[in-house]
Amino acid sequence: MSAPGPAIPFGRDGSSRFLPALTLLMVFLAGLALAAVMDLERALARWDQSLTGTLTVELPAATGATDKSLDAALAVLHDAPGIKSATAIDRDATAKLVEPWLGTALSPADLELPRLIDVRLDVSAHADLAALRAKLAAAAPGATLDDHQLWLDSFARFARSAEITAIAILVLIGGVAVMSVAFATRTGLAVHRDTIELLHLMGARDAYVARQFERQALRLALIGGVAGLVLAAAALLALSQAANAVSLLGDSVTLLPPLHLRGWNWAVLAVLPIVAGLVAMATARITVLATLRRLP
Amino acid sequence: MVRFENVGMRYGTGPEVLRDITLRLDAGSFHFLTGPSGAGKTSLLRLIALAERPSRGLASLFGEDLSRVTRADLAPLRRKIGIVFQDFRLIPHLSAFDNVALPLRVAGVAEAKLRDNVREILEWVGLADKLDAKPPTLSGGQQQRVAIARAVVARPKLLVADEPTGNVDDAMALRLMRLFEELNKLGTTLIVATHNAALARQFNRSVLHLEDGELQAAAAAWAAS
Ligand SMILES: Nc1ncnc2c1ncn2[C@@H]1O[C@H](COP(=O)(O)OP(=O)(O)O)[C@@H](O)[C@H]1O
Ligand SMILES: [Mg+2]
């Protein structure tokens, strides 16, 4: 004889369709939310690294940014501690930066462009930016120092709130999943009341009945969970393809952080159906035991 | 084995369907339970089989006072009782083998150990060739024999049968009664409900007669039938 199947005829109740469909949706949504959290974490770390290492010094055109004040600013920068390099961006390169907005009709010479100095910091040395700012202002009047901190801060704030939203969505999905499994289990207990009475009269303990519901919940949640994972993976791959396409159009600079899930990110996502299965199993067990305990 | 004193029973908040039931089933005894439809035969058997709880009176089973038996204690007591239901209550998607194996699996008996036991019991009821058959493909008499096999596979001390001959022809009824007699000879205590008083008389056993929820004296029962 083959291994004994469940004594309770689960195949005949609605939960065998409802639970996999529900878990599919839950795992799909949880997969997207989790991918968003992991991608934001990664993007944040990357932005942090690439931006905190650079400064831009700007000499406004209005003050007649001469080569003299440029040289003075460069001298200050070269003397300052914690600075790896300071390179003046030449007029042509600066013009190229604004070309997308102004077109090529105007030659750089016609434009009163500010002069920019690209500064690389020695990240480990912690340059004193306040002192540097004061010295620059003295050496080259009107020079401003942009450490991108403002921009980074607002990006970080955005990323954090997006992350919190995604985590809240995950928690919400978990809560809805637990409630739905509990509801489906309670329905199952009512539908199969006669078979459960039969098992009890044979001498089955509540745990035996619970085990039947647990196995069924695990099986259905795994089926739906794996399907949901496959759909989520497909959606994430499609999204990252789309992001790549956008970044190809826009040269190397892109506003969209391209979705780049790494190996361990996928591993975390692959755990989702298992988590869904275990949550369904635990919920079914607790629901069955709590419901049966109230019987006379 | 079973002792009831002035036991009453009601379903939920309904009226008492059993009143002042006083009875004693000694170990190894064989009783018929007769009475018209609606008299309370099924209710009394459900009470004895621990499917219902008495609403009053003293009831003890295997020496245990039922008023002190908790929900957790029910399982081991129920494993000493076999039940044959009037409507069989076989599980339709399980084979005859798996239906009969269920009480053993519920009690945690290992697969290797229960296999021969289940085969032997199904052979005893004459269904050795129907191990893999699903109940809906079996005749009424065959289903009833699977149900009897399931009720006795765990060697219960007490067997409760509710109108086991109600849905089969006379020849099959006689055959089933012979199975019950065999079990009784092996020491099983039996109580068999039937509305067929002639069948009960034929076996010359103790008869408990129910009328409208009350047990009649044995002599009256004979007279009534
Ligand atoms: N589950 C139930 N709920 C409420 N009343 C019931 C239930 N089962 C039986 N009864 C009532 O109990 C009485 C006895 O029924 P039952 O024990 O089935 O008698 P019998 O088996 O002798 O025909 C009847 O009046 C019946 O309507
Ligand atoms: Mg009845």
Image (cartoon, coloured by chain):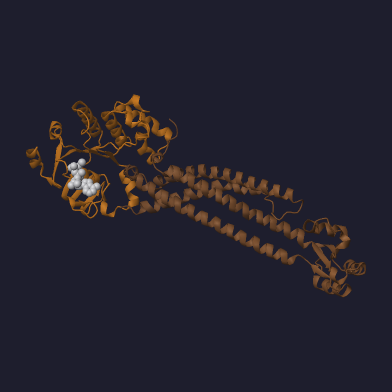
Chain colours: A brown, B orange
Q: Position of residue A259 (x, y in %)?
A: 67, 50
- Residue lying at the far front of the rendered structure: A105
Q: Is residue B221 left or right of residue A106?
A: left
Q: Is residue B48 left or right of residue B101?
A: left
Q: Is residue B45 above or below residue B144?
A: below
- Is residue A201 visible to the viewer in this orientation of the structure? yes
Q: Quadrant of residue B201?
A: top left
Q: Quadrant of residue B122?
A: top left
The residue located at (71%, 56%) in the rendering is: A255
Ligand 2 quadrant assignment: top left
Nearest the eye: A117 or A65: A65
- Residue lying at the far top of the rendered structure: B129
Q: Is residue A232 above or below residue A255?
A: above
Quadrant that contains the C terminus of chain B: top left
Q: Position of residue B29 (x, y in %)?
A: 20, 38
The residue located at (21%, 31%) in the rendering is: B177
Exactly how many numbered labels are in the figure? 0
Q: Is residue A296 left or right of residue B205?
A: right
Nearest the eye: A144 or A284: A144
Quadrant that contains the N terminus of chain B: top left
Q: Position of residue A213 (x, y in %)?
A: 42, 45
Nearest the eye: A62 or A55: A62
The residue located at (34%, 54%) in the rendering is: A294
Q: Position of residue A14 (x, y in %)?
A: 41, 43
